[in-house]
Amino acid sequence: MIIATDDLEITCPTCKGERVIKDNKCDSCSGKGVILTSQGQTLLHFMKRHLEK
Ligand SMILES: [Zn+2]
């Protein structure tokens, strides 16, 4: 299975990847500049579930 980075995360539409809004950390992406897609969240939850063992 091949997953491109673009399938997992996209540029935050709120701050447009700037990570900040008017010098405040962007809440939508927690200052990351990107947000997870639903596929990215699925993968993240899957990995967390298995890493916590
Ligand atoms: Zn943002």
Image: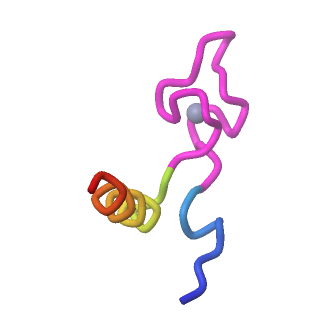
Q: In what quadrant of the picture does the C terminus appear?
A: bottom left
Q: Is residue 51 above or below residue 26?
A: below
- The prevailing secondary structure element of the residues shown in magenta is loop
Q: Residue at x 60, y 55 (%)?
A: 10
Front position in the image: 20 or 51? 51
In the rendered image, residue 13, in percent from the top left (x then y), is placed at: 58, 43
Q: Residue at x 57, y 70 (%)?
A: 7
Q: Quadrant of ligand 1?
A: top right
Q: Left or right: 51 with respect to 26?
A: left
Question: How are the colours assigned in the image?
Answer: rainbow
Eyeballing the image, is 24 above or below 6?
Answer: above
Q: Residue at 66% across / 21% down in the picture?
A: 20
Q: Is residue 24 above or below residue 46?
A: above
Left or right of 29? Residue 32 is: right
Report the front residue among 31 and 52.
52
Residue 41, percent across and down? 39, 58
Q: Quadrant of residue 39?
A: bottom left
| Residue 12 within the segment the image draws in magenta | yes
Residue 28 lies in the magenta stretch: yes
- The answer to whether 10 appears left or right of 17 in the picture is left
Q: Residue 30: x and y, percent?
A: 51, 28
Residue 14 image offset from top left, x and y in percent: 56, 35
Seen from the viewer's position, the closer of residues 45 and 26 is 45
Which quadrant is the N terminus positioned in? bottom right
Range drawn in magenta? 10-35
Residue furthest to the top:
23
Q: Residue furthest bottom?
A: 1
